[in-house]
Image (cartoon, helix red, strand yellow):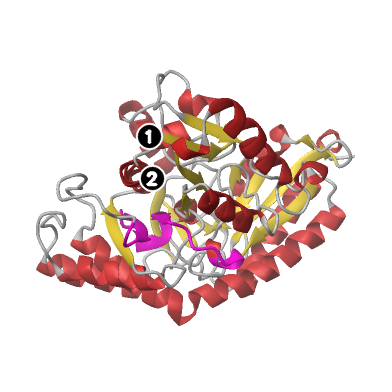
């Protein structure tokens, strides 16, 4: 039995995991739910508050994955809960693509005014991130009258057929679903840690692939509707591109009349220490895809575009539940909380987390790289720092052991661990999380430690 003292009694593990009640719930779930679901570890959640998750057996965990970067304002923030309750008491649903109501119109205004760049914007609402990508895909084709799309290896854009066609993260996500949407090409996303000579300071190899291979051998640039890119690759490994990459990508797109779509589903809404990650590079995308942190856990996605780009006519695209009034009310409160201090907190605490993780890197050779912005941070684990051999087995074991000690983490990429906690965490939470990770790394058997 493991217990820890903390100012909020977190972590507090009082039972063998999974506990008896959790084991029963998990058995029920696995009997009746789809086998396609992926569960990182046997966590059966009962409730959450701030950065704390409590399971059905009363064990409390420090949450550093936030429902996969969704609960930006923390679990069940009282102001978000109040906004949901008040809106639900007035109007739960009316379909915003057919009728008018205040929360949707006000949220559209707020997002349009917050989006990077001075151009006037419009917003289309969806239920999820993958639906936002689908909408962006369709709009890009409609607006440009072109068919081809360019995406990146390592990218994750969703699981519906259009979004899946753009995704190139894991074979298992695409296997068995062909044929996918045609006329999609993938190129390398620059990875300064693994390919420093190839990527240089601006992702040179990527641009060589696009302009000297793709445009000369596969598709003419005037047939390309859009390039879709994650500002920081999420599931691909929390990879931050070189400093000039996004500016060069925007210039290339403009040169050929191609739209630039920024998939900010994971990186947006304050996670990187700015409202939108693209603000770090001063780039105004033609279309922005949002979801995850937009409504603090309520299902809501959106695309934000320039006025002139969103030129499809009535009836060409719609969504019954997109822009749901309860979700919009949660999103409006989320934006207020982000602007009132959570974005600044993400920048401050994120810098501290990188500092603490870098200290760990100096003591544990298994950590080959520490990277990220704000509270979107990844560490890459390698078996050998010279060869950079991915430490896949070790990464998976570390995530499991952290869970057993009360810290919730998730993997990403081949051998990386992502840190995407609620934006409400503080320096004490960082110290607790890093201390647990340090303990787990120190307990690895010698054969599992890097050289």
| Magenta-span inclusion, residue 152 | no
Q: Quadrant of the C terminus?
A: top right
Residue contact at pointers 2 and 1, CB within 8 angstroms: yes
Expressed as whole percent of the image width and height from the top left, the position of residue 235 reads 56, 43
Drawn side of residue 280 relative to residue 191, left or right: left
Along the viewing direction, whichever of 408 and 334 lies nearer the viewer: 334
Q: Residue at x 52, y 30 (%)?
A: 219
Stretch in magenta: 279-308
Q: Residue at x 41, y 28 (%)?
A: 36
Disc 2 designates what residue? Answer: 133
Residue furthest to the bottom in view is 340
Drawn side of residue 106 relative to residue 431, left or right: left
Q: Residue at x 44, y 78 (%)?
A: 339
Q: Earlier in the sequence, mark 2 or mark 1?
A: 2
Determine whether the residue tagged by mark 1 lies in a helix, strand or loop: helix
Expressed as whole percent of the image width and height from the top left, the position of residue 388 reads 82, 38
How would you rate the neighbour count of disc 1 (Cα within 10 Å): few for under 14, some for 14-19, many for 20 or more? many
Disc 1 designates what residue? Answer: 162
Q: Residue at x 63, y 39 (%)?
A: 211
* Mark 2–mark 1 distance (CA, rounded to whole Å): 8 Å
């Amino acid at each position: 039995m493991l217990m820890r003292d903390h100012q909020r009694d977190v972590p507090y593990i009082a039972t063998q995991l999974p506990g008896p009640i959790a084991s029963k719930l998990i058995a029920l779930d696995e009997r009746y739910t789809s086998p396609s679901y992926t569960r990182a570890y046997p966590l059966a959640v009962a409730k959450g508050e701030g950065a704390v998750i409590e399971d059905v057996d009363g064990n409390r965990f420090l949450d550093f994955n936030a429902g996969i970067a969704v609960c930006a304002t923390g679990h069940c923030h009282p102001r978000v809960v109040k906004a949901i309750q008040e809106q639900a008491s007035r109007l739960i649903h009316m379909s915003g693509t057919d009728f008018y109501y205040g929360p949707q119109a006000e949220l559209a205004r707020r997002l349009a005014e917050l989006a990077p760049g001075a151009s006037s914007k419009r917003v289309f609402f969806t239920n999820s991130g993958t639906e936002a990508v689908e909408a962006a895909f369709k709009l890009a084709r409609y607006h440009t009258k072109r068919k081809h799309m360019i995406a990146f290896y390592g990218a994750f854009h969703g699981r519906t057929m259009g979004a899946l066609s753009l995704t190139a993260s894991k074979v298992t996500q695409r296997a068995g679903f062909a044929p996918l949407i045609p006329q999609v090409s993938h190129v390398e996303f620059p990875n300064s840690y693994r390919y420093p000579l190839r990527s240089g300071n601006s992702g040179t190899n990527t641009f060589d692939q696009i302009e000297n291979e793709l445009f000369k051998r596969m598709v003419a640039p005037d047939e390309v509707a859009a390039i879709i890119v994650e500002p920081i690759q999420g599931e691909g490994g929390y990879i931050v591109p070189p400093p000039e990459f996004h500016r060069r990508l925007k210039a290339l797109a403009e040169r050929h009349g191609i739209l630039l779509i920024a998939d900010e589903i994971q990186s947006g809404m304050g996670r990187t220490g700015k409202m939108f990650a693209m603000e770090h590079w001063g780039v105004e995308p033609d279309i922005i895809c949002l979801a995850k942190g937009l409504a603090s856990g309520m299902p809501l996605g959106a695309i934000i575009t320039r006025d002139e780009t969103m030129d499809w006519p009535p009836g060409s695209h719609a969504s019954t539940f997109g822009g749901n009034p309860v979700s919009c009310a949660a999103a409006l409160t989320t934006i207020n909380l982000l602007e009132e201090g959570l974005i600044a907190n993400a920048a401050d605490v994120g810098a501290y987390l990188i500092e603490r993780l870098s200290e760990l890197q100096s003591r544990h050779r298994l950590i080959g790289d520490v990277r990220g912005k704000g509270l979107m941070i990844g560490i890459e684990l390698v078996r050998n720092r010279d060869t950079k051999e991915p430490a896949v087995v070790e990464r998976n074991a570390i995530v499991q052991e952290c869970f057993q000690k009360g810290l919730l983490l998730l993997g990403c990429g081949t051998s990386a661990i992502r840190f995407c906690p609620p934006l409400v965490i503080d320096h004490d939470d960082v110290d607790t999380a890093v201390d647990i990770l340090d303990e787990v790394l120190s307990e690895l058997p010698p054969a599992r430690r890097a050289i």
